[in-house]
Image: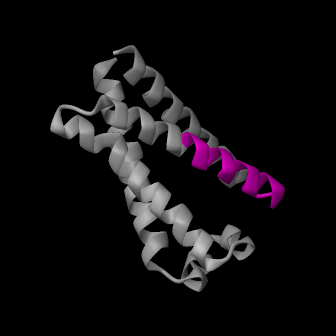
Amino acid sequence: MALALWIIQCLLGLIFVITGSFKFFQTKEKVIASGGAWAEDFKPGIIKLIAAAELISGLLIFVPRLLGYGRNFTIIGAACIAIIMTGSIYTHVRRKEFRHAIINSAFLLQALFVAYACMQS
C-alpha cells in the first residue's frame, strides 16, 4: 500500500506541476491552441489562477514526502487537487467534453485516495 501511495503521489504531483506550469507560462491563446478549449470560457487572469493552484497543489502532493515531513501539506495539496478537478469536471460536462471529464474524474479519485491514505498513516 505504501508503494502504491508513493507512486500515485509522485505521478499526480508531477502531472499537476507540469500542466500547471504550462498553463501559467503560456498565453490564453496558446492554451486553447494546445487542446485546452475550456480556456475559451475564462479570462486570462482566471486561467493563471487555476494554473498557479495546480502548480502549488502538485508540489504539495510530493515534496513533503521527499523531505520526510509535512504530511498535512500533502493532505492539503490532495484536497486542493480534488477541488480543482471537481470544477474541471463541471466545466467539461457543461461543454459536453465527456472524455476530458472522465480523465479528470480519474485524477479526482487519485487525489481523494492520496488524502485518505495520508490521513490514515
Q: Is residue 96 left or right of residue 49?
A: right
Left or right: 116, with 8 as reference point? right
Single out the residue that lies furthest toward the top.
120
Quadrant in the picture for the N terminus: top left
- On the question of residue 15 being in view, the answer is no
Instruction: Please state which of residues 2 and 53 is positioned toward the viewer in this rendering.
Output: 53
Find residue 71 and report its horizontal and vertical position in percent. Answer: 31, 30
Whether residue 41 is visible here, answered yes or no, is yes
Any magenta on residue 85?
yes
23 falls in the magenta region: no
The majority secondary structure of the magenta stretch comes to helix
The residue nearer to you, when weighing 55 against 107, is: 55
**Left or right of residue 106, residue 90 in this image:** right
Q: Position of residue 89 (x, y in %)?
A: 70, 49
Bounds of the magenta segment = 82-97
Relative vertical location of residue 50 with respect to residue 24 in this rendering, above or below: above
